[in-house]
């Protein structure tokens, strides 16, 4: 048996990363890309293969840096006190209308027309002006065409933004 990174230590860090990215259980201690870069693990017989873990952690670093540069962060808290519920949803709709996604890298990205049309449906849902509202489940399951060698929206930006929108739509019930 060969030695590798201690699985318990690696799993604990990955749990924090997933929580920070909004994919795991909420934690009180979010992790930054620099925290991941500085991470060290004890060696343990039968542990994880170091190169595989290092490769995965580099991908997480990219995801954490992308999240830190998101174009718009939506207010996720339920409206309270001075802001009425409908005013809060109007504020969220206005944020959706103002979102600006970065262009895709190397001539690839999501089809801009499809994303813009989908965002229009979300705005109508938030404002309560549609007979066919978009659900949080639909937002999470949405698939879009990608474009090559023409302008498109950066896929990571759109996916991150829509994840936040899905959380907002869950409060629309």
Image (spheres, rainbow, N blue to C red):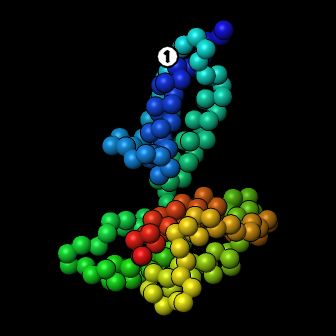
Q: Quadrant of the N terminus?
A: top right
- In the picture as drawn, the residue positioned furthest to the front comes out as 173
Q: Secondary structure at mark 1?
A: loop
Q: Is residue 32 above or below residue 94?
A: above
Along the line of sight, the residue nearer the viewer: 145 or 15: 15
For label 1, the residue is: 42
Q: Label 1 crowding class (10 Å Cα cut-off): few <14, some 14-19, many 20+?
A: few
Q: Is residue 145 left or right of residue 45?
A: right
Residue sitting at 20 percent across and 78 percent down?
82
x then y, percent, for residue 11: 51, 31
Residue sitting at 63 percent across and 81 percent down?
117
Residue sitting at 58 percent across and 11 percent down?
45
x then y, percent, for residue 140: 58, 64
Q: Is residue 66 left or right of residue 90?
A: right
Quarter of image, res 104? bottom right
Q: Quadrant of the C terminus?
A: bottom left
Along the line of sight, the residue nearer the viewer: 13 or 147: 13
- In the picture as drawn, the residue positioned furthest to the right comes out as 149
- In the picture as drawn, the residue positioned furthest to the top comes out as 1
x then y, percent, for residue 111: 71, 72
Along the line of sight, the residue nearer the viewer: 149 or 145: 145
Residue 37 in view (yes/no): yes
x then y, percent, for residue 75: 36, 67
């Amino acid at each position: 048996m060969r030695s590798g990174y201690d699985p318990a230590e690696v799993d604990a860090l990955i749990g924090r990363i997933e929580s920070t990215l909004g994919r795991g259980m909420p934690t009180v201690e979010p992790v930054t890309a620099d925290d991941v870069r500085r991470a060290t693990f004890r060696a343990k017989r039968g542990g994880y293969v170091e190169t595989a873990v290092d490769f995965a952690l580099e991908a997480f670093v990219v995801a954490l840096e992308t999240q830190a540069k998101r174009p718009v962060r939506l207010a996720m808290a339920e409206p309270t006190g001075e802001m009425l519920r409908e005013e809060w949803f109007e504020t969220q709709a206005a944020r959706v209308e103002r979102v600006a996604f970065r262009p895709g890298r190397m001539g690839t990205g999501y089809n801009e027309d499809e994303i813009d049309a989908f965002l229009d449906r979300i705005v109508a849902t938030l404002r309560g002006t549609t007979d066919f509202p978009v659900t949080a489940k639909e937002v999470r399951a949405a698939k879009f065409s990608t474009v090559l060698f023409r302008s498109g929206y950066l896929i990571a930006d759109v996916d991150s933004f829509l994840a936040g929108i899905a959380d907002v739509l869950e409060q629309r019930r």
